Image (cartoon, helix red, strand yellow):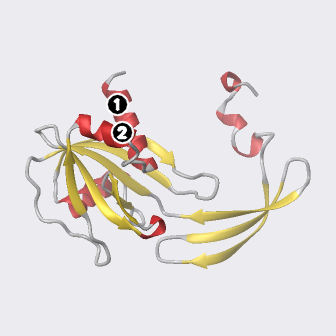
Amino acid sequence: MQADNWTPAAAGANSPLYEKTLSVSTAFKGRALVIDVIDIELPDGRRSVRECVRHRGAVAILARRPDGAFIFARQYRKCIEQAYIEVPAGCMEVGEAPDVAAERELREESGYLVKSLMPLGSIYACPGYSEEQLHLFFAEVEEKPGATDFDSDENVETLLFDETTVERLILDGTISDAKTLSAWLLYKMRKNP
């Protein structure tokens, strides 16, 4: 199928690529995610297995102060065993609207209050194994931060970068987080259509 012939109807169950679910079993249930093992039938009748991370969704916020400085967070990420620079982000609470979660997460992680919030779009960071949807926002914030309110098991350092520094850190690989790169790209595309 040519990309220019694609329609939403070609996605989902109407797609010639559709994988029929035969059974689902939960292999792991944690506080932030569930891992399901899904037995499937491929379009040609062959059978296979998919592993899927179930997640309630998250938000990520590219925030800018009135002086033009962008707000980033650095925290230790155990899965990759390093302190990592990324935009402030976090899980949505059950039933919480993405914009409400964005304002809450930004305040909790950086102390900054939102003056204006613009949705940039939503992404699936790793659809090959996870259903997690990340809602990306651009926020204009107050000049000075207030108090932070980190989760009891996290340590977050707030960093401020100008636009040139952000782009240098992206190009040299210092910033390589998918949600951060996506937020930056969508921000730049909306800023300079």
Residue in the image at 21% along x and 53% along y: 159
Question: Furthest residue to the front?
Answer: 172
In this view of the protein, can residue 118 be seen by the observer? no
Dot 2 corresponds to which residue?
A: 184
Residue in the image at 63% along x and 58% along y: 129
| Neighbours of disc 2 within 10 Å: few (<14), some (14-19), many (20+) | many
> Where is residue 31 shown, x and y percent of the image?
47, 77
Dot 1 corresponds to which residue?
A: 188
Q: Is residue 140 left or right of residue 52?
A: left
Quarter holding residue 10: top right
Above or below, comparing residue 8 to residue 100 in the picture: above
Above or below, comparing residue 193 to residue 61 in the picture: above
Question: Furthest residue to the right?
Answer: 45
Please tell me how many numbered marks the rendered image carries. Answer: 2
Separation of disc 2 and disc 1 at Cα? 6 Å
Q: Are marks 2 and 1 in contact (CB under 8 Å)?
A: yes
Q: Secondary structure at mark 2?
A: helix
Three-letter amino acid code at the position of disc 2: Trp
> Where is residue 119 shown, x and y percent of the image?
35, 41
Residue in the image at 29% along x and 59% along y: 74
Q: Is residue 61 left or right of residue 41?
A: left
> Where is residue 33 shown, x and y percent of the image?
52, 70
Q: Quadrant of the N terminus?
A: top right
| Neighbours of disc 1 within 10 Å: few (<14), some (14-19), many (20+) | few
Three-letter amino acid code at the position of disc 1: Lys
Quarter holding residue 12: top right
Q: Quadrant of the C terminus?
A: top left
- What label sits on residue 80 in the rendered view? none
